[in-house]
Image (cartoon, helix red, strand yellow):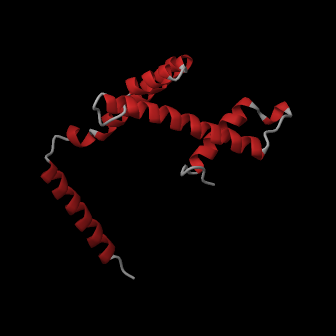
Amino acid sequence: MRIWGLTNRLTATVQKIITEILPPSSGQTFSKDARDLLMECCVEFITLISSEANDISEKEAKKTIACEHVEKALRDLGFSDYIADVLAVAEEHKQQLKSREKKQSKMEQSGLTEEELLRQQQELFRSATDKYNSVPE
C-alpha cells in the first residue's frame, strides 16, 4: 500500500502505534478506514513539518535540515509541546549512530593500511577458491 509515495513502513509503524494504544485485550478495534485516515494525517503532519523546516534551512542558506530547523518549525507551527520529545528522540538517534561508528572503526583499530587489508582479503579469497577447487566431486 502506498500513500503519497510512502512505503509499507508507514503502515507498519502506524499499526504498531495503534496496537500499543489499543491492545486486543481492550475489546476495541480500529477500522481500516480509520487507520487509513490516521496514516493520511501522519503523512500530512510530516509533510507540514518537513516543508517548514526546509523553508527555515533555506532562509539560513543551509543545504541540510538540522534538528534546530525542525525545532523552530514545530515552534512556529504551534507544536511546541512536541519539542522535548523530538529532541529526546534525536539525542537517542545520535547515540545509536555513535555506537555504530565505533563498530565501523574496527578497520582503523586493526592498525593495518587499506592496502594491507585489501591484500589480506584477496589472499583469503584465493585460499577459499583453492579449497573449493580442491574438493573432490
Residue displayed at 68% across by 38% down: 38
Answer whether residue 88 is visible to the viewer in this image: no
Q: Is residue 116 left or right of residue 77?
A: left
The front one of 14 and 66 is 66
Percent across and percent down for residue 136 are: 36, 80
Answer whether residue 7 is visible to the viewer in this image: yes
> Which quarter of the figure has residue 54?
top left
> Which quarter of the figure has residue 99?
top left
Q: On screen, 85 above or below 50?
A: above
Percent across and percent down for residue 46 are: 53, 36
Residue displayed at 14% across by 52% down: 116
Dividing the image into 4 quarters, which one contains the C terminus?
bottom left
Residue displayed at 23% across by 43% down: 107
Q: Which residue lies most toward the right here?
A: 27
Percent across and percent down for residue 27 are: 86, 34
Dividing the image into 4 quarters, which one contains the N terminus?
bottom right
Q: Is residue 44 left or right of residue 52?
A: right
Percent across and percent down for residue 23 are: 77, 33
The front one of 128 and 113 is 113
